[in-house]
Amino acid sequence: AYAAGEDIDFSAVPVDLDGVDDFRLAIYDAARKLSFGETTTYGELAKTAGHAGLARETGAALGSNPVPLVIPCHRILAAGGKIGGFSAPGGSITKEKMLAMEGVRVGPPPPAQVSFGF
């Protein structure tokens, strides 16, 4: 259903994070609060999780995310709204496709005026 573009809420899916350190638990918890089609940056997620200034560490934590769809790391963008990395197969191309399924367009806006073609 999710792959068909249906708004599926995975936030209540139980996840066993036994053995995960407190920093990653906070990051994963904050990421799970992002709704379908909602994005934030690594820096903002770090701040929301109580770890302001740790954007790179947040990226590393998400890079070791044990359940990438349930903990929606694809919704976390690099500074400036850039796509950023993604550790799942297909990398950032897969991330961009997942975001597109949720109605999120990443990258510069399309030109306001198209070419005249002559």
Image (spheres, rainbow, N blue to C red):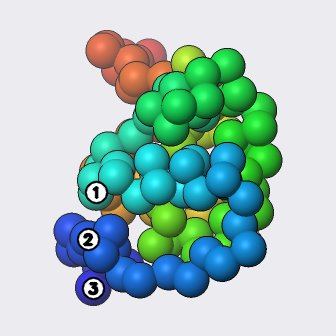
Front position among marks 3 and 1: 1
For the residue pair 82 and 25, the one nearer the viewer reads as 25
Instruction: Say what amino acid the circle numbered 2 marks.
Output: Asp
Quadrant of image for the N terminus: bottom left
Is residue 13 placed above or below 69 in the rendered structure?
below
Pointer 3: what residue? Answer: 1
Pointer 2: what residue? Answer: 9
User: Mark 1, residues whose alpha carbon is within 10 Å: few (<14), some, or many (≥20)?
Assistant: many
Q: Residue at x 78, y 47 (%)?
A: 60
Please provide percent x and percent y for residue 44. Answer: 50, 26
Please provide percent x and percent y for residue 47. Answer: 52, 26
Tell me the element at label 1. loop
What's the CA distance linking mark 3 and mark 2?
11 Å
Instruction: Say what amino acid the circle numbered 1 marks.
Output: Phe
User: Badges 2 and 1: C-beta atoms under 8 Å apart?
Assistant: yes
What's the CA distance linking mark 2 and mark 1?
7 Å
User: Mark 3, residues whose alpha carbon is within 10 Å: few (<14), some, or many (≥20)?
Assistant: few
Please provide percent x and percent y for residue 103. Answer: 28, 51
Closer to the chain start, of discs 2 and 1, is 2
For the residue pair 11 and 117, the one nearer the viewer reads as 11
Is residue 75 placed above or below 118 in the rendered structure?
below
- Residue 36: numbered disc: 1
Please provide percent x and percent y for residue 108. Answer: 49, 23
What's the CA distance linking mark 3 and mark 1?
13 Å
